Amino acid sequence: MKLSLLENRGSLVGSWVLLGALAWSANAHAADYGVKGPEAFTITNLAPGASGATGGKLVVPNGAGPYPIVIASHGFSASSANQLGWAEHFASYGFVVAAPDFPGGLQPDHVKNGTIVEALVGEVARTVPKADATRVGLEGHSAGGLATTLAAAKIKPRAVVLFDPVDANGIGKTAYGTLCSSTLVLFADPGQCNVTAQWKGFGPITTGPLALANVVGASHCDGENAARGLCSVPVVGCGSAAAPARQTVHARYATAHFLALLKGDTAAAATLVATALAADTELAETSVKAGPECAPAPVGDGGTTPRPDGGTGPTPTPTGTTTSDGGPTPAPSGTSPTPTGAVPAGDTGCGCTTAGTTSGAGAVGALAAIGALVLAVRRRRARA
């Protein structure tokens, strides 16, 4: 069931709270958004340099659209590969999803990454005919959650999802305090790879609708959707390796949030009301607050640049494509470029950052220590 009421941005109460409460009372919350949706999709490479990103992936449903836009942002030392699973999942529910590769490697510029997220929304709106610039959502994990928050404070998207976000020198807290977009934050257990306790302490300082929850037993690595070889190494401090069951919880609530806010889906909204969250034994310390939603800021040129095909902005030239249904579109000949100075995702611990650090020096030292440990183990095995 879908209602046009969600189109009203002037609502003084979070739309999904109102509509979800109605749907909850009508037992309309049976769908499991943790499983992949019905839409087939196509994956293309983001052109290097697009909106300041060094590359990445664009996942577009194969249907006619129009579809809301979602930007999925990776964390420290990661890449778009660590967000591609989420991008595919959201696209299967009818969203155009861009997952950028951020520059900076082990010395990320969080403010710059926020501007990349902001610019990429406009880029997608201009270059993807099926994309609807009036319906925008942002998702980010770890330091990607910080970049997402900085971008959201500026462009005021309808929906924001943060997976175990971290802060750096308080810039996240400042931006978070100004959020008026409907926001969902899912936390993992505290560890050296996150500052969960600090971010969670920000609590309901946002001005808009907000839902908070702990994913029971989750590690920091569960907030991304790709394997990380060293996530379970104790010295890394990210906790245990990612588990599919816990990743499903992240997918379930993030997808419901986007469906409720960007598509007016009341059944999805029902999964996000306080009663439903509290009843889920896979969640703990749940909290929901209402608040006034803000009007969205302009996105790029609003997608008004005319295009010969009747869309807006220049038509993109994909560098390679794959399809979710095994269609005939050829797969890319290579992988997305790895950001300069970045460590490949499979060779690092987690998408982690050091609390209160923007230089990444502490993380560099930690990664060096991990590398030395792995090398020492290999040498011992060789001698044996």
Image (tube, rainbow, N blue to C red):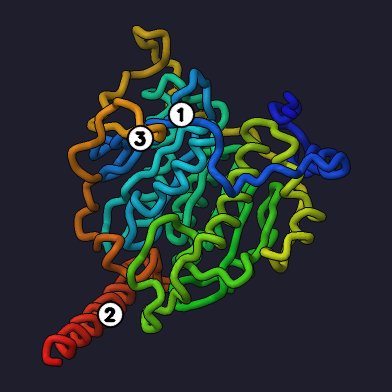
| Label 3 element class | strand
Give coordinates of residue 32: x percent, y percent: 65, 46
Mark 3 lies on residue: 43
Give coordinates of residue 160: x percent, y percent: 58, 46
| Label 1 element class | strand
Task: Identify the amino acid type marked 1.
Answer: Pro
Task: Identify the amino acid type marked 3.
Answer: Ile
Give coordinates of residue 363: x percent, y percent: 32, 73
Q: Earlier in the sequence, mark 1 or mark 2?
A: 1
Mark 2 lies on residue: 370
Q: Is residue 7 left or right of residue 327?
A: right
Quadrant where the N terminus is found in the figure: top right
User: In percent of the image, x 40 and y 83: which residue is there?
Assistant: 234
| Label 2 packing within 10 angstroms: few (<14), some (14-19), many (20+) | many
Mark 1 lies on residue: 61
Q: Is residue 182 above or below residue 172?
A: above
Please state which of residues 237 and 14 is positioned toward the viewer in this rendering.
Answer: 237
Q: Is residue 131 above or below residue 225?
A: above
Give coordinates of residue 27: x percent, y percent: 83, 42
Q: Is residue 22 left or right of residue 382?
A: right
